[in-house]
Image: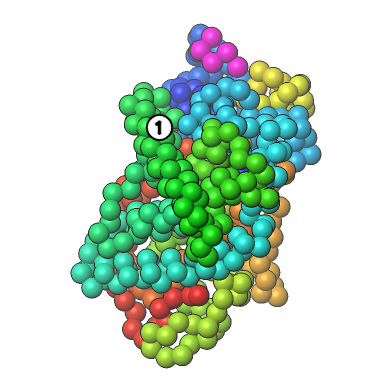
């Protein structure tokens, strides 16, 4: 979340489109050369399974593979899912690798000055401010207030309505609305109430999804332009509303909007200092909302799909909830606070396993500032774009064992019943090294509170034979959504506060 999203760069898929044309149907999965195009063979025949094909290549090549450039690419691309290489690049030699100016140009929708796209001193400054914002006591108080309210006043009424009307609902859309409202509250102080019975049109998150898809597949320029316009309109509206509140003295009210990132910026809060340039505010507000909404809702969507396919996990989660949450009878809220969510070890493990198998951002790119030799023995230089595949790493038997493709929350639980902590260069869903996600705890709090409230109160039945696959985008959303029916469970607590 927030700084954790260093997106796969602009050039990845236009190049990899031509990487693996026919060899996937042969015994040997290693790409072969074509005249003029070097090793840029076509992947068009397998484009819908791109991540799986890359994982197949990396499994066969022991986690690392160099694609030599050609007159088309004019650079080499090094694919890796080797944890030793990841640690070397993202931690040990962090200062020797950067995102690069070309990446900022391609992802200009997220700005050049914000936390996502910046490098070096500018990045250090933005990260320091972001950390101060999140670690502030008022932010912790805000979390304790808005998460329970969002569930009780937003999620529960909508799920009750869906259940009573026996509606078929896109659970991915519902989760996106949940996390979007939360993200807006912490970023701007305003709740768009997209999670409501009428399922109003969502401008910003849908626009970001379109833009992310267009960034990856550049022929969708109209989507990118429309997305940019909607995001800018959203920003202007949020800024105007907050400025009006400040001018009228409304910011003094003790409500959920008093400690948001936008409020800190405009009021010159001690956390952010003097009001920065509008571009900086716009870039970081956009980034915070996208990181919070996008990554968390994506993870929750894959989580509920995996739980639907593995009912043993749902049973264990419900047993854990029953053991740990006090109950005062029918429809009474359990007497538990957000800081008690750490009791839910199995739920936490199931979420970790989801993030391992389906990382919300499946790729990460870095460019060396100087020649370097990686632990795998490969040589890279300023003309090499290093692509780290978190999706492939989860499917490496050398990293996670022969059962690496299975959904096994138990792999995250120690013998004494605690969460097993894996190093970030192995469990790469939250990045690693100095750029490791500063919002990791926030993400887990929101995911656990949301998942626990849903599983404890409802049965979610995914439509049989509904096609489930990933979309080709820089975010790992489901291409066709997640159609499901929701029904109430009897005599169960309503929400977690």
Q: Residue 229: x, y in percent?
A: 37, 32
Q: Is residue 469 above or below residue 441?
A: above
Please provide percent x and percent y for residue 443: 55, 57
Left or right position of 452 against 227? right
**Of helix, strand and loop, which one carries label 1?**
helix
For the point 71% across and 38% down, the residue is 124
- Residue stretch rendered in magenta on the structure: 71-75
Residue at 66%, 18% in the rendered image: 383
Q: Nearer the viewer, residue 414 or 26?
A: 414
Which residue lies at the image location 38% right of the left edge and 69% below the top edge? 153
Looking at this view, name the residue that lies furthest to the front. 248
**Which secondary structure dominates the residues rendered in magenta?**
loop
Q: Which residue is mark 1?
A: 228
Occupied quadrant, residue 57: top right
Residue 295: x %, y % from top left: 50, 49
**Label 1: how many Cα within 10 Å (few below 14, some 14–19, many 20+):** many
Q: Is residue 468 above or below residue 126?
A: below
* Residue drawn 38% across the image and 66% down it: 155
Q: Is residue 487 visible?
A: yes
Q: How has the structure been colored for display? A: rainbow
Q: Position of residue 381 (x, y in %)?
A: 71, 21
């Amino acid at each position: 979340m927030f700084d954790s999203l260093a997106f796969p760069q602009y050039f990845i898929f236009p190049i990899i489109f031509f990487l693996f044309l026919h060899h996937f149907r042969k015994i040997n999965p290693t790409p072969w050369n074509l005249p003029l195009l070097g090793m840029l063979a076509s992947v068009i025949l397998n484009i819908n399974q791109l991540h799986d094909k890359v994982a197949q290549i990396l499994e066969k090549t022991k986690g690392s593979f160099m694609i030599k450039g050609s007159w088309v690419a004019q650079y080499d691309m090094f694919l890796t899912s080797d944890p030793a290489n990841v640690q070397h690049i993202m931690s040990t030699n962090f200062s020797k690798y950067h995102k690069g100016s070309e990446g900022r140009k391609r992802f200009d929708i997220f700005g050049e000055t914000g936390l996502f796209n910046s490098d070096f001193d500018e990045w250090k400054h933005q990260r320091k401010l972001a950390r101060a914002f999140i670690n502030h006591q008022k932010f912790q108080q805000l979390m304790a207030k808005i998460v329970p309210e969002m569930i009780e006043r937003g999620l529960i009424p909508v799920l009750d309505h869906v259940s009573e009307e026996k509606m078929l609902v896109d659970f991915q859309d519902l989760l996106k609305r949940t996390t979007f409202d939360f993200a807006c509250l912490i970023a701007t102080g305003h709740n768009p109430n997209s999670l409501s019975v009428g399922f109003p049109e969502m401008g910003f998150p849908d626009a970001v999804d379109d833009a992310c898809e267009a960034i990856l597949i550049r022929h969708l320029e109209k989507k990118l332009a429309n997305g940019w316009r909607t995001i800018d309109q959203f920003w202007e509206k949020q800024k105007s509303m907050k400025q009006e509140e400040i001018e009228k003295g409304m910011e003094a009210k003790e409500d959920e909007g008093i400690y948001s990132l936008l409020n800190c910026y405009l009021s010159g809060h001690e956390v952010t200092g003097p009001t920065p340039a509008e571009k900086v505010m716009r870039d970081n507000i956009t980034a915070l909302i996208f990181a919070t909404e996008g990554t968390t809702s994506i993870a929750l969507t894959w989580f509920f799909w995996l739980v639907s396919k593995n009912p043993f996990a749902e049973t264990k989660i419900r047993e854990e909830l029953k053991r740990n949450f006090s109950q005062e009878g029918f429809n009474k809220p359990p007497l538990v606070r957000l800081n008690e969510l750490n009791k839910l070890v199995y739920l936490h493990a199931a979420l970790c396993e989801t993030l391992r198998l389906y990382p919300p951002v499946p790729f990460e790119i870095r460019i060396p500032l100087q020649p370097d030799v990686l632990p795998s023995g490969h040589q890279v230089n300023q003309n090499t774009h290093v692509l780290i595949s978190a999706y492939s790493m989860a499917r490496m038997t050398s990293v996670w064992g022969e059962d690496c493709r299975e959904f096994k929350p138990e792999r995250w639980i120690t013998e004494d019943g605690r969460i097993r902590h894996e190093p970030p260069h192995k469990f790469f869903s939250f990045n690693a090294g100095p750029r490791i996600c500063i919002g990791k705890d926030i993400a887990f709090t929101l995911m656990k509170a949301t998942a626990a409230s849903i599983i404890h109160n409802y049965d979610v039945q995914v439509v049989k034979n509904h096609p489930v696959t990933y979309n080709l985008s820089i975010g790992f959303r489901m291409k066709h959504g997640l159609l499901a029916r929701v029904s109430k469970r009897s005599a169960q607590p309503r929400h977690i506060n």
